[in-house]
Amino acid sequence: MTLEAILRCAILQQYRQVDYRGLAFYLKVSVSFIEFARVDHCKPPSKSTLKELISAIQPSTWEALDRSLLSSDKECDVERAEVIRVDATVTDTANPGAL
């Protein structure tokens, strides 16, 4: 696997909150996972391979990646997202007794 594919798999794992078994499953059956991770669809990685490769990513690598993303955000004038708004609008349901 390429370094890019390993990082993409690690990102998918964190985003979907799955273990290595779940990640390996999704990389076998989900076209969107396969395409995003850029893995070989004919030979997806096993859970043990994923564990070995993803756990080998050093904290310093994650930190460098984070710094790089933050600096590119500043250059592109991306919003800082210091405040998050969550909409909690209440609406009537068609059949309130069904709940």
Image (spheres, rainbow, N blue to C red):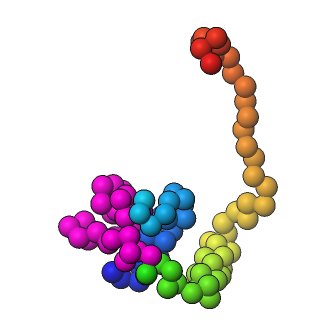
Residue visible at 59% across and 81% down? 62
- Residue 68 visible within the image: no
Residue visible at 75% across and 47% down? 85
Residue 43 in the magenta stretch? The answer is: yes
Residue 63 spot, x, y in % from top left? 64, 83
Residue 51 spot, x, y in % from top left? 44, 76
- Residue range of the region highlighted in magenta in the rendering: 23-51
Q: Nearer the viewer, residue 17 or 32?
A: 17
Residue visible at 64% across and 72% down? 73
Relative to 66, is 41 on the left or the right? left
Residue 4 in the magenta stretch? The answer is: no
State the quadrant of the N terminus.
Answer: bottom left
Image quadrant where residue 95 sits: top right
- Residue 2 visible within the image: yes
Q: Is residue 54 above or below residue 60?
A: above
Q: Is residue 67 above or below residue 20?
A: below
Q: Nearer the viewer, residue 30 or 69?
A: 30
Relative to 59, is 85 on the left or the right? right
Image quadrant where residue 69 sits: bottom right
- Total tally of numbered discs in the picture: 0
